[in-house]
Structures are given as structure tokens and as C-alpha cells.
Image: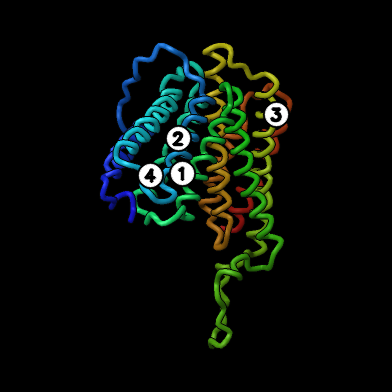
Amino acid sequence: MSADNSGGNVSVPLRNLLNSIQCIRDRAKGKYDFLSPSLTTSIDANQAVKAVSLEATKLSLAFSKPPLPSQQDGEKLSESILKSVLTLSTVYYWLPKSQGVSLRRQVRDATVEVLDGVTQLLEVILSSPLQSLSQEQLTSTGGVWSACDRFAQLPQDNKAAVLVVLSSQIAVVKDAIEEIEQALSEAEDPFNDVLDDDQEEENPRGNQDTYWSEQDRRVIAPCQGLMKASTACLRKLTSAVKANGDSGSPQNVAQLDDLADISKEISPGVDDLALCLYPPMDYSGVENNVRHTSSHVCGESELTWVQFLEGAVDHNLQKAKDLIQQDS
């Protein structure tokens, strides 16, 4: 028997709770307008997320073994969970935009992650046979705990939030560089573990579209240089934000958000460039993405380190263009 099929209709308050939390989650995602509740006291974010974690644990334990809670107990439990969820969501809704867009986005994403976890737990309880604490229910409960733990580790101001953005962008660019380097260091055919050769065919595979030519490899070198310049730019930007970033005024907060938005344009460009480099190399795509990536790497030219990066970018950009034109 599952909670959804129990004779005592305990599923009714659980389904109502599920619908309410899904609605709150969709509002947090921006699907609907949200009207803030009329609260006059401040909310401790850490206490709010601890409350959600505790209520999720109570819910899971209540449905971990027979007998099922009564409908009245289910209603009380549902009311308590909903209250904790509303309090947590209000932490995001009440966070002023003047505190920074980057900070608000991370608080919103963390809030949605917690709500997703509670939603999944409720769905598991409503659908799982009530025999014992299932592995799926244990996993869902652990998912709520993990989401709550990550919420508690959110940055405290916009400067810290922007540093989180920069760190994630550096990781993406670094991964792209390492993947290209690994492919170059392996066999001539970087897809030999994906494509299956049939040696018994009259014409064994000779498709050069799966191999890098020597000309391809010469084009890759300056593109790698541009990708590494992107990493250097992001690292230097990180150092500058750590040393000089300030969330003390609306103007400074807005500048930090602008830096975060600009940095987010670098990693997609690097990713697209890396994809174009794999055989068969898309020379037109390489040229377009080289130009796009280089346009986001440089900032204020009066800074010495930026002048150095500009030189590295220009050098690799021109070298890549020359090699592409030679091949075409």
C-alpha cells in the first residue's frame, strides 16, 4: 500500500502540499508574479533552511514504516512543512535587488533546488509501496539534506557571489583546454574509441574526416593560446575582484554584476571554439569563434596585464586566421 492508496486519505494533504510547493517553486523560477507575504520580522536564512531539512526528515520518518499517519496527522505535518518552505522562499523574495543580481540568482537557484528536493520526496512517498524505508525514499531525503547544506553555504554578498561565477567560468574553460590537450596527446584519431572499424571491409576506414591533418594541428596551436589567454583573463579578473571588489554601494554592486555577465560570455565562446576544432575541423566556425572569443577577453587597456593579454590574443587570432586562409 502507498500513501496515495491508503484508506485514511492521508494522501489528500500530501497532494495538496505537493501542489502548493510546486506553485511556490514555479514562482521562484519566474513563471508567475509573486506577492510577498506581510511579514514584519527579519528572516534568518540558515534557520529557515534548517527548518526545511528538519521537516523533510520528519516527513520521511513518518512514512518509513507502517502504520501510516492519520489524515489529521498528515494535515499537521503538511502545514508544518509548508510553513517552513514559505519561510525559506521568502528569504529569496525579500532579498533586495540592490544587494546584487548575481547574489539573487544564486539564492534563487539554491531555493529552487531545495524545493525540487522536497517535491521529489513527496512524489516518492505518494507512489512508493509502504513496506519499509525504500532506497528511493532514502535517496530523496538525502537530496533534500544536500540541497539545504548547499543553501547554507551561499555567498553572503554580491562580491562573493561574483567570485563564485568567475570560479565556475574558469573551471569550464580549463576543462575545454584539457580535453583538447588530451585528444592531441592520444592517437591520431581522437574518435578511435567511439567509431568502430570493420577491418574485414574491402575498403577499411580511410575517412580523414576523423583525423587531424598536420594543417589542422597547426591551426589548433594558436587557438589553444587564445583559450589559455581566456583563462588568464578570468584568473586576473578574479584577483582584481578579490582585492578591490566592493558591495558597499549600489554602483559598485552593479559593476560587479556587469563583470559577472561579461565573464559568462567567455566560456561559451571557448566551448564553441573547442567543438569546431575536432575533426573534421570547421574552419569557418573556428574563425568565427576565434573572433567572438577574442572580443570578450580584453578590458581596460591601460592595465599592464591586460595589455599583455591583448598582445597574446591578437597574436593567436592573427596566426589562426593566417593558417585558415592558407588551408582554404
Q: Residues within 10 Å of mark 2 (few under 14, many from 20)?
A: many
SS type, badge 3: helix
- Kindly identify which residue carries mark 3: 307
Residue drawn where x is 55% and y is 72% of the image: 195
Callout 2 amino acid: Glu
N-terminal label among 4 and 1: 1
Callout 3 amino acid: Gln
N-terminal label among 1 and 2: 2
- Kindly identify which residue carries mark 2: 55
Closer to the camera: disc 4 or disc 2? Answer: 2
Would residue 309 be found to the left or right of residue 85 on screen? Answer: right
Closer to the camera in the image, 244 or 117? 117
Percent x, y for residue 32?
A: 30, 30
Label drawn at residue 61: 1
Residue drawn where x is 57% and y is 15% of the image: 252
- Kindly identify which residue carries mark 4: 122
Closer to the camera: disc 2 or disc 3? Answer: 2
Q: CA distance from mark 1 to mark 2?
A: 10 Å
Residue 220 lies, with reference to residue 267, above or below; the image says below
Closer to the camera: disc 1 or disc 2? Answer: 1
Judge whether residue 68 can be spotted in this image: yes
Q: CA distance from mark 3 to mark 4?
A: 56 Å
SS type, badge 1: helix
N-terminal label among 2 and 3: 2
Q: CA distance from mark 3 to mark 1?
A: 61 Å
Would residue 86 be found to the left or right of residue 266 on screen? Answer: left
